[in-house]
Amino acid sequence: MDISPIINGFGVVLEPDNLLYCLVGVIIGMLIGVLPGLGPGATIAILLPLTYGVGPVPAIIMLAGIFYGAQYGGTITSVLLRLPGEASSVVTVFDGFALAKQGRAGTALGIAAIGSFIGGTVSILGLTLLAPIVAGFALDFGPPEYAALGVLGVLLISSVGNGHKLKAIIAACVGLLLATVGRDTFTGAERFTFDSLNLAEGIDFVPLAMGLFGLSEILYNIEERHNQVHSPAKVGNVWPSRKDLGRSKGAIGRGSLIGFFLGVLPGGGATLSSLAAYAFEKRRAKQPERFGRGAVEGVAAPETANNAAATSSFIPLLTLGIPANATMALIFGALLIQGIQPGPQLVAQHPDVFWGVINSMYIGNILLLIMSIPMVGVFVRILRVRPAILAPITVLITLLGAYTVNNQVYDIFLVIAFGLLGYLMKKLGFEPGPLVLAFVLGSMIENSSRQSLLIFGGDPTGFFTRPISGTVLALVLLVAVLPLIRKALRRRRPAEEPAGRADEPVEENTP
Amino acid sequence: MSLDRHRSRSLLSGDYRKRMKTALDVRPKLRSTHTTRTPPRGTARTKEKSMPASRTAPRRVLAGVLGTVAAIALTACGGVKTTSTGGDGGEYPSGNIEFSVGASPGGSTDLITRALAQGMAKELGVSAPVLNKPGANGALNAKELQSAAPDGYKLAVQNASLFTITPLTVSPAEATKIDSFDVITGVSRDDYVMATNPKSGYKSIKDMKEAGKPIRYGTTGVGTGAQLASALTFKTAGIEATAVPFDGGSPALTALLGNQVDVSTMQIGEAIENVKAGRLVPLAVFSKERIPYLPDVPTATEQGFDVQVTQYRFLTAPKGTPQDVKTRLLEAAKKTFATPEYKKFNEQNSLTPMEVTPDEVLSSLQSDTATYKKQLDEFGISLAG
């Protein structure tokens, strides 16, 4: 491997102008990541004209910075206000918000920042060394593989929650049902749209998640406050302790790898990776019951994974010309405007752009880590604000955020409706997590399996004979059956200690 | 706004209100700098007020920082404020002209709208914010536009397929009608190409026919030109084929590159790089004549299959927009079309200019609708799966 273009890439990045654009990008990214709703996609669309005047390298460096910077920022509202701005940070809410409630928001944010940094960096290393190889791997994933992954994902959801298993399954089913709303991709038939054009494209993730998580929490707290004097949450330590770091070490390492590989898959990679990383840690844990009640690993694993995935989602764009998500589509557009066609020939034709962008990510991640540390202290103070003041502001931000996604007032009502649903669910002991995650995976499972069946000519055995989907489905079986077997074994030997916990056999590598 | 406050504080020193005010003051200047394609420069006033500490930084970049921060502040606040209140009396335009897009940021329609809005804003001397209102393939945005005041302050670039193909797949009540709009001008054509993975060995439509094997083809979704073009091709050629609809161009491309489907029909801009790199073999384009971006690829008609499907876009305003306003908009659009920047934009996105009169747009829409309907009826094809 010829490394001189890589070295030259560093030369490009270290030019003062480019460094500054990188800094500007990550700062903007981090800030817009904090505001739920206005995602990196919309921001890049708005800022696109500003990049016309500068060269391609600084332009793309800045836009990329916005994208991965937003991943850092997104954690903050998930942890502090229970507002996941993107599907990939839903899982972070479980333990992040629990930690914040215990006055350990600083720990959560600190560990997320460190995990994000490591995950991001590992992923860039992977991008530098393996990009062309993993790009091929992404192409091996056709509809059958996505369908199998989706099923695995739904199965993992049931192990994510801490409450009643049955209730989690019911919530997940509701989520799958909600995912069916909208125009059918295959026939164009309207499903549960009640003749409303607003529902024709289905329900958007942002209003759903914001209502079920953020708004419902506020509604619930209002009731709580009636019953007791509510003081602002106490803010304890601002930095993770050595013990926390030790606990998260493994989670961060595994999260990096899971994130890198699943992130390469266009569409849904980031969400799946955070879910898989979380579920994996919970299964490995000696005390899985800590998860959902404020386990640092529960923040470290998904945050590391989604950052690693965000970085590796550049691979399909830069090596195949396939934009993996809406933000990548905009960066694709920005490259086109600069006269550069992203695709297989990009590395050869524009090595300065390719390596410049990749290497800028090393620098950008370092900048983000440096910025995050003081920022954690600042943001954590938000929790010192009295709920009577914080709650209405949060509601306002939530509604505004939902509006900015599609510029539709309709979405504001949707947030309110889901807020009420979330409130009722909380009263009845249902968790919103399984519902939201199943909703995200629902359309992926449905579309992919229908596409697969069309490809197979209606023969479902194809799912099992293809190597990758077959392996994933075997894993599904393993995950589903193993706990039952273990339970049965334990029942047979009630006298013995619950043995075999340390050497759990679920060590199969996640693809 | 409390979060916003933290943001501004942590980034720039100075009182928040003052910051917001300066950010808003910059607005017209900021917009106009967008359009000139020079490096973004904030005003000197803003620079001194809000960021005295960083004088050492290169001016250009610093201005870029300020500009972007201001833009962020604007978007954060812009959501609540409805624009376009101008229009009563005086010469048009006296306020912002809002361009809405019936698709998410990043797609062709979005990029075209942004390029056009930018140029027209410069010509007309006003701001032209672009708002994305995705939903129902653009029908949601169309419905909103048709009920807006016909004063020339709300415009949208719309797709032909919404008027020619979508009505073939949805109920008549839901179909969008071109009668509800005034067309200002045609904009550009975005043609389709059918391509295959080199592993398949096919080089033309005839090859597929002679192979006699059933074909699985990827499309970019139900009710798209890609679906219509492939369905018609396989039917007229008598090839047994199954459609696998994907949600847009990039998953259809991914599936083809991964050899999950035998052929896919996509927009040229989506496929062209992989065609150039030899990872895809183009089989046919569906335009009347060959396309300059792919000069070696024969049209379907040339290969003996009478299939012509094109996607084109045009600028629309609500029905009843005054003639002088339309003339003004047309002039601005024409001047934009003539700029080298805009021409370059078309080339980079593999778009063919179709800057024709409203009447020509209307007659194309009419004849396309009629042709598609006739062909579908003739071959008994239903686009709805």
Image: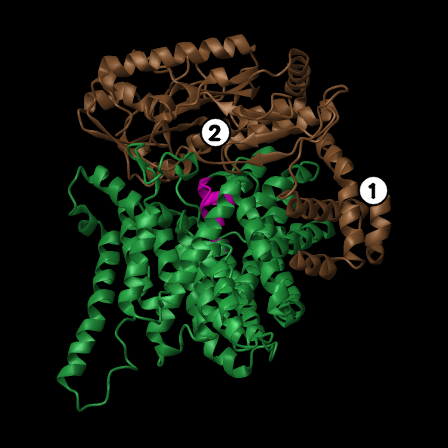
- Where residue A277 appears, as percent x and y from the top left, is 39, 65
- The residue at which mark 1 appears reads as B43
1 vs 2, front mark: 1
Left or right: where A81 falls relative to A463: right
Determine the chain carrying the residue at label 1: B
Q: Which chain is green?
A: A
For mark 1, give the secondary structure. Answer: loop
Q: Is residue B119 left or right of residue A328?
A: right
Q: Is residue A491 magenta?
A: no
Does A405 appear above or below A478?
A: above
Q: Is residue B281 visible?
A: yes
Amino acid type, mark 2: Gly
Question: Is residue A107 depicted above or below A319 in this figure?
Answer: below
Q: Identify the residue at horizontal 39%, vertical 56% (top origin).
A: A436
Give the side of residue A138 with respect to residue A112, left or right: left
What is the crowding at mark 1: few (fewer than 14 residues within 10 Å), some, or many (at least 20)? some
Residue B84, image x and y in percent?
67, 31
Considering the image in quadrants, where does the C terminus of chain A appear? Answer: bottom left
Chain B, which colour? brown
Residue A328 is at least partly visible in this image:
no
Q: Which residues are magenta?
A: A311-327
